Amino acid sequence: MSAGTTRHLRPPIQAGQRRTVHAASGRSELVGYAPGAYDLFHVGHLNLLRRVRLQCDYVIAGVVCDEVALAQKGRLPVVPQEERLEIVAALDVVDEAVMEWTTDKLATWEQVRFDVIYKGSDWAGSPKWTALERDFIRRGVRVVYLPYTEHVSTTILRHHHPTSS
Amino acid sequence: MGYTAGVFDMFHIGHLHLLQHARARCDYLVVAVTTDELAEVTRARRPVVPLLERMAIVQSMRWVDHVIPQLDPDKVAAWQTFRFDVLFAGDNLRDTPAWRSTATELAASGVRLEFLPATYTRSGHLLERGPADLVAE
């Protein structure tokens, strides 16, 4: 029985081999950051984090707090912030989950120090993220847009959730 | 080796805590995720999230070692296949006759039956089908 979990092992650093230091994080591992509300956790969220896992050595999921989610989406998430954080932190593809208390992504970067930030492709070309791209490039951070596969949309899950009626 | 089963529809914190508690009480956790068809029979409604997606999410949890689809609700039959040492179930089932007979049969084979506590959300709202998920039957 071996098909249960996914493990991502990295080859050991050989003697004499140079460790790459990534400028933005200052770490030898490439640190990827994937912010989101992760409300009503579904396979679309999981697939996005799996893609991040494939591209980075260390995956940090940023879970926006209820207040920030309310400010950004105009409504509170169905699932409270502590529960959203705990579920994302429990994923084997995630090394660390942090709560995002601010809408200011640069302030978040100051604290988290990631090399790549991942965002759903629906944000590519938006004025906010185009400006952010410029700010991030100056800090050595790449912005990568990933396709967001919503097999079961949050709207449908929201409709079926016991607290929705 | 521990074994538990459930529908795990719309994965929530109650599911997560059950898996965590179960894994803390064994070294290898097998989770059987109820198929859409079986859930339709036992719960009289199809899960919102299809089987493969529910399995993918359960499998992505750190505390889960192995995931299989649950086609047959019979735990004794499952034991004959997997030979687990402990069977985990939600504690709301403790006194149901079906579980009593299952417990007796499994105890005869040396299997421990452990009940895990129900989980509440921050608001104190008992999550729908949280631990009850572990029954499905």
Image (cartoon, coloured by chain):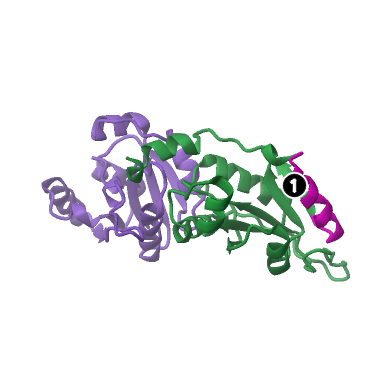
Chain colours: A green, B purple
Q: Residue at x 76, y 39 (%)?
A: A125
Q: Answer whether residue A1 is visible to the viewer in this image.
A: no
Q: Is residue A78 above or below residue B86?
A: above
Which portion, as a residue range, is magenta?
A125-141
Q: Residue at x 61, y 57 (%)?
A: A62
The image quadrant where one finds the N terminus of chain B is bottom left
Within the magenta stretch, is there residue B22? no
Within the magenta stretch, is there residue A127? yes
B36 relative to A37 in the view: left or right = left
- The front one of B75 and A54 is A54
Q: Residue furthest left?
A: B97
Q: Residue at x 19, y 56 (%)?
A: B107
- The front one of B121 and B112 is B121
Secondary structure mostly seen in the magenta stretch: helix
B52 relative to A17 in the view: left or right = left
Residue B38, by quadrant, is: top left
Locate residue A165, reporting x and y percent: 32, 40
Locate residue A117, reporting x and y percent: 72, 53
Chain that bears disc 1: A
- The front one of B118 and A126 is A126
Q: Residue furthest bottom?
A: A15
What residue is disc 1 on?
A129
Q: Residue at x 82, y 67 (%)?
A: A14
Locate residue A28, reporting x and y percent: 79, 66
Amino acid on which the number 1 mark rests in the picture: Trp
B44 relative to B34 in the view: left or right = left
Q: Is residue A123 above or below residue B83?
A: above
Locate residue A32, reporting x and y percent: 71, 56
